[in-house]
Image (spheres, helix red, strand yellow):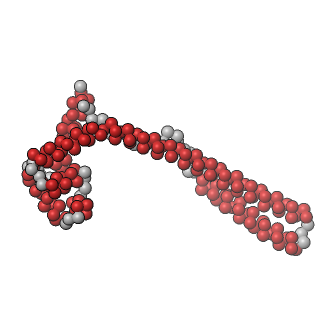
Amino acid sequence: MAVRPRAPRYESKEPFEEESGTKERIVIIVALVLVAALTVADLVEDRIEGATLSHLVTEGVVVLAATAGALYLMRQLLKKSHAKNRVLFADMVSAREDAKKWRAETASLLTGLGQAIDVQFEEWRLTDAEKEVGLLLLKGLSHKEIAEIRSTSEKTVRQQAASLYGKAALEGRAQLSAFFLEDLLLGVKTDAAA
């Protein structure tokens, strides 16, 4: 049975415009809000001082125009943000489905590998502690991480790892990993050549 390579990282199907323009729009929105606020303050002061109706109407139009412009730009930013979020959510759902499918397709292979590792550990006559350390080493954890997981000292983990390597006639972690991966990698080459 061929070992399938891991699926490539998922990339969005819908490209987005770069974020250029977003900062500029925010600056313009702030400027428009500031213009509207200052014009309102001026309107109030002009009203108190008895400015003409035409002057007050002109400044009122400035307030409305600045407010409308700011609201329009905010709406555009929100639309862009919502569209991007919808695509990102769809991408996330699709990536999860792909991962679920990959896990289902490889479940029997992983189960078989796990069983093969267990059988080999038994042949090496490892203790339960050495088996657990061995599995964690194969997963790529450091001695310190293994010690934390197992609630033991790092020294104990190093001793158990050394005992495992001795019983298996291996020189270290790299050879332990290679022992199990070599057959898998050879299997891939053989299947690809067939």
Left or right relative to 122: residue 88? right
- Quadrant in the rendering for residue 9: top left
Percent across and percent down for residue 152 are: 20, 65
Exactly how many numbered labels are in the figure? 0
Residue found at the very far bottom of the displayed protein: 49
Is residue 193 in view?
yes
Most foreground residue, 24 or 183:
183
Q: Is 77 on the left-hand or right-hand side of 153?
A: right
The location of residue 42, given as percent across then percent down, is: 80, 69
Which quadrant of the figure has residue 189? top left
The residue lying furthest to the top in this view is 194
Q: Nearer the viewer, residue 184 or 135?
A: 135
Q: Nearer the viewer, residue 182 or 116?
A: 116
Instruction: Answer yes or no: is residue 144 visible.
Output: no
Is 152 above or below relative to 186? below
* Residue 135 in the figure: left or right of residue 75: left
Residue 27 lies, in percent from the top left, at 64, 59
The residue positioned 26% from the left and 29% from the top of the image is 192
Name the quarter where the N terminus is drawn: top left
Residue found 18% across the figure and 38% down from its top:
183
Q: Who's the residue at 85% across and 70% down the image?
A: 46
Residue 165 position (above or below residue 187): below
Identify whether 1 is placed above or below 125. Answer: above
Q: Which residue occupies 72% across, 54% down? A: 69
The C terminus: image quadrant: top left
Residue 188: x percent and y percent? Answer: 24, 34
